[in-house]
Image: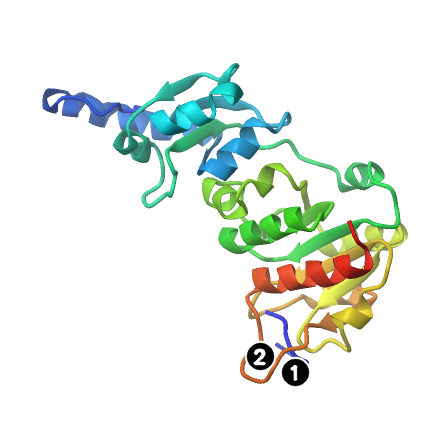
Amino acid sequence: MTGKKRKPGHGTAFAGRVSNRDAERKKAPRAHAEAAGGVWLYGLHAVRAALRNPARVVRRAVLNERAASEFAKDLAHVPSETVDTDALARLLPPGAVHQGAALLCDRLPERDFEEILASLPPGNRVVAVLDQITDPHNEGAILRSAAAFGIAALIVQDRHAPPESGALAKAASGALDIVPRVAVVNIARALEELGRLGFWRIALAGDGEAPLAEAARAGDIALVLGAEGSGLRRLVRERCDIAAFIPMGGAMESLNVSNAASVAFYEIRRNTPL
């Protein structure tokens, strides 16, 4: 994504006896249909974080025996079922790595980034702004790093970001329920507002004019990351105070955007420690 300075551009079906297979097949699609009004989250970290997030409404928990025992204290007020692994897998998308635990949840309520920022003392706030990063695995990995480095919020564009999903939550390893995720209509205007709030806006770009270590100064920072390939859009980049790059050796000219985000969060936090 960004690297060394380069040229510009760029049924609940419980497992049962053989005689009950037809009934099981009828139950499983009904469970899938329930997700239309919510979202299935799966994986131990994602389930744990969702159960402990007071803003998350959990409708139903489906777990194997081991996970049911592990989450017993968190399930006191949640309708829950204990099933075998095959029955759980039938509730979820093919290939979902559920680790024996899944929740049917409402999507998280919309957040206002000014309210989020107002709850934190100025001078040490860092937010990440994602410009048209649409891969849920990339955004999930960025959320995970954001949680690790105390990033205050993740700002995305509502029409050009992955929807809240099990894949996003699994990749985020619980961070979807830890780091506030704010969807805005216009990224450029959100950056203008961040500027008015005193944020130093850094565009991460391979053809930036300064290394990130020099561009990242103490104080409130908005780090802006663009999609791989197309990079940051012109209007978004123009709303930033500086464009910076991550110095790299000659063997590889760029990083995956989620890896670049991790490096950048670390570098920024060296000047604005937690």
In this picture, is 166 found above or below 11?
below
The amino acid marked with disc number 1 is Arg
Dot 2: what SS? Answer: loop
From the viewer's side, name the closer residue of 173 and 57: 173
In this picture, is 259 found above or below 244?
above
**Side of 131 where 251 appears, left or right:** left
Q: Position of residue 249 (x, y in %)?
A: 61, 82
The amino acid marked with disc number 2 is Glu
Disc ID at residue 17: none
**Side of 199 where 48 appears, left or right:** left
From the viewer's side, name the closer residue of 241 and 248: 248
Residue 235 visible in rendering: no
Picture quarter with the N terminus: bottom right
In this picture, is 105 found above or below 149?
above
| Neighbours of disc 2 within 10 Å: few (<14), some (14-19), many (20+) | some
Q: How many angstroms separate mark 1 from mark 2 (CA)?
A: 8 Å
What residue is rendered at 55% in x and 49% in y? Answer: 140
Which residue appears farthest toward the left when viewing the image? Answer: 19
**Side of 124 where 41 appears, left or right:** left
From the viewer's side, name the closer residue of 187 and 109: 109
**Which residue carries the number 1 mark?**
6
Q: Position of residue 155 (x, y in %)?
A: 69, 49
Q: Position of residue 242 (x, y in %)?
A: 81, 69
**Which residue carries the number 2 mark?**
253
From the viewer's side, name the closer residue of 110 and 146: 146
Q: Look at the numbered discs 1 and 2 and tell me whether their residues touch, using CB distance below 8 Å.
A: yes
Residue 231 visible in rendering: yes
Q: Nearer the viewer, mark 1 or mark 2?
A: 2
Displayed quadrant of residue 237: bottom right
Q: Position of residue 38 (x, y in %)?
A: 49, 30
Dot 1: what SS? Answer: loop
